Image: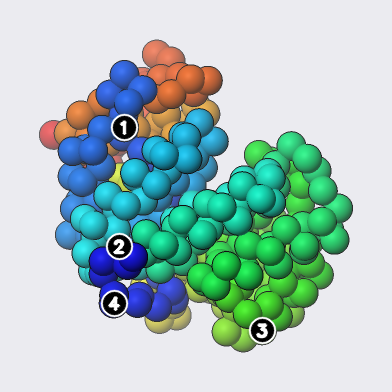
Amino acid sequence: MRKYPLKQQIGNGAYTAIVTPMINGVVDEKSLVDLIEYQTKNGITGIVPCGTTGESATLSFKEQTQVVKLTIKTVAGRVPVIAGAGANSTAEAVKLTRAMKYFGADAVLSVTPYYNRPSQEGIYQHFKAVAGIGIPVVLYNVPTRTGVDMLPETVRRLAEITNIIGIKEAKDDINQIKELINTCPKDFLVFSGNDSLALPTVLAGGNGVVSVASNVIPDEITTMIEFALDACSVAGDVLHTKFLPLMEAMFCYPSPAPAKNALALMGIISSDSLRLPMTQIDEGSLNYLTSVMSGLKLLS
């Protein structure tokens, strides 16, 4: 059962969609621990293992539980852990959610069923079943990857269900984000799923970001969000402008390859290894990424 009984409250801030370090395609536990320590020591609000950035689509059930258990053990109650537990099969998503609850995650991140392209009613019933497990659920809408867009009216319906506490909105549409903020219950959390929209999301009344760039710069992303939450828009915009090139560079090649490469270049993880069908970044993308990182003085 749960080893760390302190129940963390999921709230405002910056949460890292953490990569899953690997060596030759095998989970690298030492690098994962090192990366988590780097995150917590640099003030990140929370950790999200086994999301899209964590290559959840190619991790087995055993590997996902391995990564989440190690994350929870390493964090040891210092910050919340929102465990990825999505699947395109409702039965599989329920199974994963039940496991993450058992192992002690503070909440789960649950993506819309991918490839199936369900109706809005199908999406609603899927998440209703997931919420029935009895752990806080953060919905995850990322239509460019899943092939289906969870519409604001569906999110509003889901927000009324006990245990569904928020959404990671990764559709690149600030108007849809604003609609969620303005029409969902006031205590329903709205996180940007895109670093480039994190600042405008919070300034519009949102709660923060589930970030890829914070793998590399947790302190800076967290500070940017804190400025925005405190309505210090000018200070937040300075950081946003400065680090926007890095946010964009995180997607100069299919993610999470750039993030893994950046972390390896910084010596935080031991390898930029990925699992097929994901591959390491090409020479042109590497040159672009290193140029951006050098300009920001992230490379010694």
Residue drawn at (34%, 44%), measured in percent from left and top?
66
Marks 4 and 2 sit apart, C-alpha to C-alpha, by: 18 Å
Report which residue position mark 3 lands on. 185
Whichever of callouts 2 and 3 sits on the residue coming sooner in the sequence is 2
The spot of residue 179 in percent (x, y) is 73, 71
- Element type at marker 3? loop
Residue drawn at (85%, 61%), measured in percent from left and top?
121
Residue drawn at (56%, 52%), measured in percent from left and top?
95
Quarter of the image for the C terminus: give it: top left
Comparing marks 3 and 1, which lies closer to the viewer?
Answer: 1
Whichever of callouts 2 and 1 sits on the residue coming sooner in the sequence is 1
- Indicate the amino acid at tag 3: Pro
Above/below status of 9 relative to 94: below
Comparing marks 4 and 2, which lies closer to the viewer?
Answer: 4
- Indicate the amino acid at tag 1: Val
The spot of residue 247 in percent (x, y) is 44, 45
Q: Hey, which quadrant is residue 140 in on the image?
A: bottom right
Comparing marks 2 and 1, which lies closer to the viewer?
Answer: 1
Report which residue position mark 1 lands on. 27
Q: Residue 6, which numbered label?
A: 4
Whichever of callouts 4 and 2 sits on the residue coming sooner in the sequence is 4
